[in-house]
Amino acid sequence: MTAEIIGTGSALPMLAVNNRELEGIVDTTDEWIKSRTGIENRHIAVEETTTSLAVKAAEAAIRNAGVSAQELDLIIVGTVSGDLCFPSTACQIQKALSAPNAVAFDMNAACAGFLFGLAVAEAYFKASMAKTALIVGAEVLSKMMDWKDRSTCVLFGDGAGAAVVRASDAGVLSMVQGSDGERGGALTCGNRPVNNPFVSNPFRLEYAKMEGQAVYRFAVRTVPEAVRQAIRQAGIEMSEIKYFLLHQANIRIIEAVAKKLEQPMEKFPTNLQKYGNISAASVPILLDDINQSGRLQKGDKILLAGFGAGFTWGAAVLEWQR
Ligand code: ACO
């Protein structure tokens, strides 16, 4: 028993903001952002929320899969930017979709959120605890940025991606996951501090902070290892992979991974130029782009990989069945 992706969907905020527009907000340049990251544009939420984007992506994935919301028995949302502490984004999606038969919960694995969701869904299928799952990666990261900190605010965007996944005999061929909390201090965002009548701790909003080079080194070292491991576990050759769909953090990370794996960049589709880094939403949005543009045929083998804060990482080899 494994998991098969039977439909994908995505949603982006209306407002697109290019690098030149950021030049008027922080001390940066289009040239700096493009040359260091590859990013040219990102979508930023104004009217939208994490939940509204997640619902839109989920509805598109359900339509694409040709299933009804009533068939869903599991909803997992990967997010670090839910609108509410509780209820979860997943429970809010359940309500919006009218999916009463689903168990719904959120997971925080940052940019590896979609891969972690896929791993949990597969485990539920193997344990006969579910048959049809909706996995969503949804983020409004713009609300977690210090818009005076040029080293972070130019990197991220907002959006959501989703996939409907079914228990099946074919689909996911292998799954690799890892975490390294020891080095997690390189990429953090504070939550509410302890605050109650017994401590004096005035509430102060905290924003995302990053040691960029530490994150870069982590990604370039860990992702090729995870990819090799996933391919080995799938029992296939690297050359059989049609597309490597990596988390869209930075073009230089993707180029370095491609080089280490000795694979051509044509096998690494990217959309970070248009959307920036959307954490948990990045992999499912890219998968939806590839799926909707008709670039996947039955029998194609693809690799998905997510990596980010925690540190966390996940990779999966899939054989496309549609
Ligand atoms: N515009 C102009 N100058 C900037 C900007 C900016 N937006 N941001 C930083 N700088 C300046 C710095 O202040 C510094 O100036 P100084 O030399 O006068 O001190 C200079 O540029 C170099 O800064 P570095 O941080 O050393 O730049 P670096 O070459 O490391 O690039 C970057 C930064 C792009 C973040 C890089 O470290 C990187 O790619 N890291 C990977 C992290 C990543 O992609 N994170 C995404 C989130 S995590 C994830 O999704 C996995």
Image (tube, grey):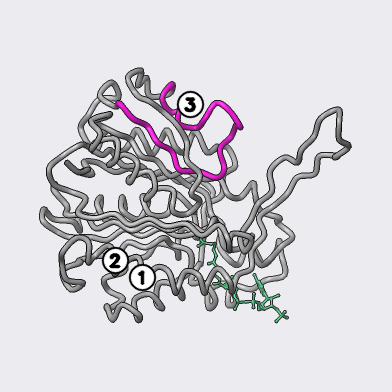
Dot 1 and dot 2 residues touching (CB under 8 Å): yes
Magenta stretch?
73-95
Residue 300 location (% of width, % of height)? 15, 59
The residue tagged with tag 2: helix, strand or loop? helix
Instruction: Estimate how packed mark 1 is, as few (under 14), some (14 to 19) or many (20 or more) residues with alpha carbons within 10 Å.
Output: some
On screen, residue 117 above or below 226: above
Q: Amino acid at mark 2?
A: Gln
Q: Nearer the viewer, mark 3 or mark 1?
A: 1
The residues bearing labels 3 and 2 have C-alpha atoms spaced at a distance of 36 Å
Q: Residue type at mark 1: give it.
A: Glu
The residue that label 1 is drawn on is 225
Question: Going from the N terminus, do you reach mark 3 or mark 1 first?
Answer: 3
Q: Is residue 138 left or right of residue 215?
A: left
Q: Which amino acid is tagged 3? A: Gln
Circle 3 residues within 10 Å: few <14, some 14–19, many ≥20: many
Query: Horizontal and vertical percent for residue 180?
Result: 51, 60
Is the N terminus in the top left, top right, bottom left or bottom right quadrant? top left
Q: CA distance from mark 3 to mark 1?
A: 37 Å
In the displayed structure, would residue 47 be above or below residue 142?
Answer: above
The reply to whether the magenta stretch includes residue 115 is: no
Residue displayed at 60% across by 42% down: 46
Q: Image point 28% across, 21% down: which residue?
A: 70
Picture residue at 20% right of the left edge, 32% below the top: 66
Q: Name the residue that disc number 3 marks.
A: 92
Secondary structure state at the residue bearing disc 3:
helix
Distance from mark 2 CB to nearest ligand 1 atom below 8 Å: no
Q: Which residue is mark 2?
A: 229
Give the foreground label among 3 and 2: 2
Q: Assess whether mark 1 and mark 3 are in contact (beta carbons under 8 angstroms).
A: no
CB of mark 3 near ligand 1 (< 8 Å): no
Quadrant hosting residue 121: top left
